[in-house]
Image: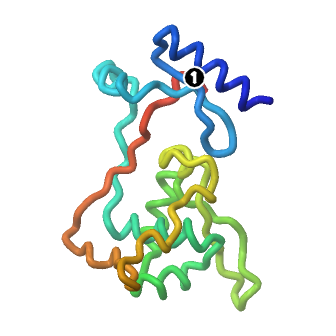
Amino acid sequence: MARSRVKELNAQYDATGRAFRAEEVAGGFQFRTRPMFADWLRRLGHVPAPTRLSAPAMETLAVVAYRQPVMRADVESIRGVGCAEILKQLMAVDFVRIGGRSPELGRPFLYATTKRFLEVFGLRSLDQLPRVDIFREEGELLSVTDLESGEEFEAEETDEPATS
């Protein structure tokens, strides 16, 4: 019922040339500005600067997103390097949160992604994450650890909420 009403609203917004539309994001609906108006909003200063993530931060975020809830030790064993500081940075930008405690010895924290992660990456739910088999070429898994050039990735919202 709600989805059909949102489609009707969006059809009306499209017909009248509105600068926004209703989008399903992170398990709910938001009014979001159309991407073609993003430059204008940036010029007016109403859009926060995009969050920049380094290649190691993106790798860590990917491990958390696909394996959550996951212990830091598991993330470190997958990446092969320590990631305590990167997890702190991801928590500071509200992409990762502590999602509980493991029953293992010492009851270490379990990490999970946040609703903001879904919003920024434009996902309705974690089910929309790309399947890992998409990254396979001729039976070999492509490695993101080859990105040691220090290249940065930009996690930028495709469009900003017009209202919350």
- For the point 41% across and 72% down, the residue is 135
In the rendered view of the protein, which quadrant contains the N terminus?
A: top right
Give how far across and how far down residue 54 sits, in percent: 31, 62
- For the point 33% across and 51% down, the residue is 154
**Residue 30 sits above or below residue 68 on the image:** above
Question: Residue reaching furthest left?
Answer: 149
Residue 75 horizontal side relative to residue 59, left or right: right
**Residue 34 sits above or below residue 99 on the image:** above
Give how far across and how far down residue 28 sits, in percent: 68, 38
Give how far across and how far down residue 69 sits, in percent: 65, 71
Which residue type carries mark 1?
Answer: Thr
Residue 22 horizontal side relative to residue 90, left or right: right
In the rendered view of the protein, which quadrant contains the C terminus?
A: top right
Question: Residue reaching furthest front?
Answer: 138
Q: Nearer the viewer, residue 147 or 99?
A: 147
The residue at which mark 1 appears reads as: 163
Q: Nearer the viewer, residue 18 or 65?
A: 18
Q: Nearer the viewer, residue 60 or 13?
A: 13
